[in-house]
């Protein structure tokens, strides 16, 4: 079952400050697609260490959305990539796709 991203952490952090929420939203909207593109480029070039570095950066976004199971999978994927193992690639891509679909729907 695919986890649903949550904005609970953002709401707690912002304490109702709408401008703060919008700044964070803009940052997520800018950074995640770029980081995911870097990941995809690294995978296509079979540079799995570089891909693992990208996953490491993306993990922070997954944690931000409070997707605990997805974060665990991303951590496994990061470690597996360091040894050239793509075992978790399709699940990781589903997680990112899920988040990228969610971001435009964010109530910000």
Image (cartoon, rainbow, N blue to C red):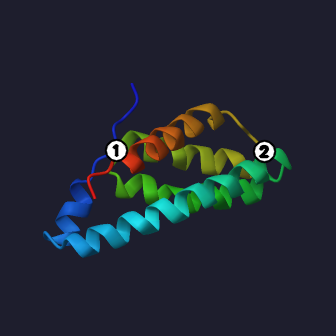
Q: Nearer the viewer, residue 80 or 13?
A: 13
Q: The N terminus appears in which quarter of the rendering?
A: top left
Q: Quadrant of residue 27?
A: bottom left
Out of 5 and 26, give the one closest to the viewer: 26
What residue is pinned by disc 1?
A: 5
Name the residue: 71% across, 37% down.
86
Assess disc 2: are there few (<14), some (14-19) or many (≥20) residues with their C-alpha within 10 Å of its C-alpha: some
Where 35 sits versus 101, above or below?
below
Quick one: SS at disc 2?
Answer: loop
Q: Position of residue 47 (x, y in %)?
A: 82, 53
Mark 2 — residue? 84
Q: Position of residue 55 (x, y in %)?
A: 60, 54
Disc 1, SS: loop
Residue 70, given in percent of the width and then of the height, sits at 44, 41
Q: Residues within 10 Å of mark 1 (few under 14, many from 20)?
A: many
Front of the two marks 2 and 1: 1
Q: Quadrant of residue 31?
A: bottom right
Left of 82 or right of it: where is 12? Answer: left
Q: Quadrant of the C terminus?
A: bottom left
The disc at residue 16 is none
How much space separates mark 2 and mark 1, taking CA atoms? 28 Å
Pick whichever of labels 2 and 1 is earlier in the sequence: 1
| Residue located at (67% from left, 33% from top) | 87
Q: Position of residue 15 (x, y in %)?
A: 14, 71
């Amino acid at each position: 079952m695919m986890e649903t991203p949550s904005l609970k952490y953002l709401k707690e952090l912002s304490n109702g400050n709408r401008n703060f929420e919008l700044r964070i939203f803009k940052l997520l909207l800018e950074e995640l697609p770029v980081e995911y593109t870097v990941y995809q480029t690294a995978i296509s070039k079979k540079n799995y260490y570089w891909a693992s570095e990208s996953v490491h950066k993306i993990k922070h976004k997954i944690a931000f959305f409070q997707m605990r199971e997805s974060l665990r999978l991303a951590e496994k994927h990061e470690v597996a990539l360091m040894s050239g193992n793509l075992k978790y690639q399709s699940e990781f891509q589903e997680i990112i796709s899920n988040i990228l679909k969610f971001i435009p729907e964010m109530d910000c």
